[in-house]
Image: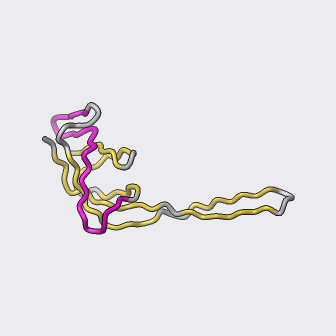
Amino acid sequence: MYAIVEISGKQYKVAEKDRLYVPLQQADANKTLSFDRVLLVSNSDKVTVGRPTVAGAVVKAKVVEHVKADKVLVFRKKRRKRYKVKRGHRQPYTQIEVSSIKTK
């Protein structure tokens, strides 16, 4: 069984016991989150597509930890002008583990 769920404007294919990185969620570690924007649910024999979401479907996940992605360096330079700027950025993510996919 798997589902397509929308989390923070992005779509993810999830199954039970999957671990994935999603944009930062406002929840502490070991807390449970529920996502009700389920766009598709597939059992072994039946596929349910939502219009735009599947009614009554909920994906529950546990927050494992909050992490940051690898550093992205931004370097700008204008030649012959003595202008150089070097900046770095690390995007925050939340690692979640899907515990259950429930349908109506």
Which residue extends farthest left? Answer: 104
**Dividing the picture into quarters, in which one does residue 81 lie?**
bottom right
* Residue nearest the viewer, comparing 43 with 102: 102
Q: Residue at x 41, y 60 (%)?
A: 93
On whether residue 73 falls in the magenta region, the answer is: no
For the N terminus, give its image quadrant.
Answer: top left
On whether residue 29 falls in the magenta region, the answer is: yes
Which residue extends farthest top? Answer: 51
Point out the stretch of residues depicted in magenta.
Answer: 25-50
User: How many marks on residues?
Assistant: 0
Q: Horizontal placement of 77 versus 44: left or right?
A: right
**Dividing the picture into quarters, in which one does residue 86 lie?**
bottom right
Q: Position of residue 57 (x, y in %)?
A: 19, 43
For residue 39, above or below residue 22: above
Q: Residue at x 79, y 61 (%)?
A: 83
Q: Residue at x 23, y 50 (%)?
A: 59
Q: Horizontal placement of 86 versus 18: left or right?
A: right
For residue 88, above or below residue 98: below
* Residue nearest the viewer, comparing 60 with 1: 60
For the C terminus, give its image quadrant.
Answer: top left
Q: Horizontal placement of 60 versus 82: left or right?
A: left
For residue 86, above or below residue 5: below
Which residue extends farthest right? Answer: 80
Q: Residue at x 25, y 57 (%)?
A: 33
Q: Position of residue 14 (x, y in %)?
A: 28, 49
**Dividing the picture into quarters, in which one does residue 82 lie?**
bottom right
Q: Position of residue 21 (x, y in %)?
A: 38, 57
Q: Position of residue 3 (x, y in %)?
A: 25, 44
